[in-house]
């Protein structure tokens, strides 16, 4: 007896249910980030949403290129988190450098109200 098992036909990621759900999640996250930017929400909201967009986009690219099946030895979530964290740290460092470059005296400090200016 031959136990021949039929070969499972592979559906491309973009046409699978998993692909549709991930792309819908990406669209929803990009939309929420756009609303945060338009509404001038606090920066942490925008940064966290941007971080999530980057991770989702990376995973979609990973699944489209089928890299998850090519390299089974690599723990993808750890790699993605490490790369995105490194990019965010570099961007944060660049923004801090720019902020200090334009404001070298340091953060703005309010003077107490009871201190009066001297009139000459």
Image: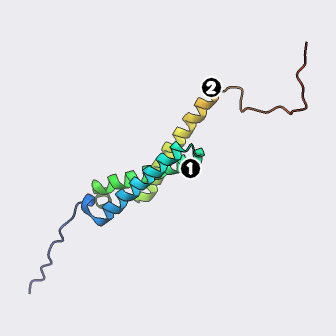
Residue depth check, mark 1 versus mark 2: number of the one nearer the observer? 1
Q: Quadrant of residue 96?
A: top right
Left-right relation of 2 to 38 = left
- Dot 2, crowdedness within 10 Å: few (<14), some or many (≥20)? few
Q: Residue furthest left?
A: 1
Where does residue 12 sit, x and y in percent of width and height?
Answer: 23, 60
Q: SS at mark 1? A: helix
Q: Residue furthest front?
A: 39
- Dot 1, crowdedness within 10 Å: few (<14), some or many (≥20)? some
Q: Give the labeled residue for mark 2.
A: 102
Query: Residue drawn at (88%, 22%), measured in percent from left and top?
Result: 117
Q: Quadrant of residue 64?
A: bottom left
Question: Which residue is more in the foreground, 86 or 111?
Answer: 111
Query: Residue drawn at (14%, 75%), measured in percent from left and top?
Result: 6
Q: Which circle marks residue 105 in the picture?
A: none
Give the Cα distance between marks 1 and 2. Answer: 24 Å
Q: Looking at the picture, does residue 56 appear above or below residue 88?
A: below
Its colouring scheme is rainbow
Query: Residue drawn at (56%, 40%), measured in percent from left and top?
Result: 92
Where does residue 119 sit, x and y in percent of width and height?
Answer: 90, 16
**Residue 72 can be seen, yes or no:** no
Quadrant where the image shows the C terminus: top right
Where does residue 43 sit, x and y in percent of width and height?
Answer: 58, 44
**Residue 3 can be seen, yes or no:** yes
Q: Give the labeled residue for mark 1.
A: 45
């Amino acid at each position: 007896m031959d136990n021949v098992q039929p070969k499972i036909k592979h559906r491309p990621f973009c046409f699978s249910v998993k692909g549709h759900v991930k792309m819908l999640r990406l669209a929803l996250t990009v939309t929420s980030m756009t609303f945060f930017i338009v509404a001038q929400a606090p920066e942490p909201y925008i940064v966290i949403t941007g971080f999530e967009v980057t991770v989702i986009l990376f995973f979609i690219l990973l699944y489209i290129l089928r890299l998850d099946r090519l390299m089974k030895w690599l723990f993808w979530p750890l790699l993605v988190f490490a790369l995105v964290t490194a990019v965010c740290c570099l961007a944060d460092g660049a923004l801090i450098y720019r902020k200090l470059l334009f404001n070298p005296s340091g953060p703005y400090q309010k003077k107490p109200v009871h201190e009066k200016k001297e009139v000459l």
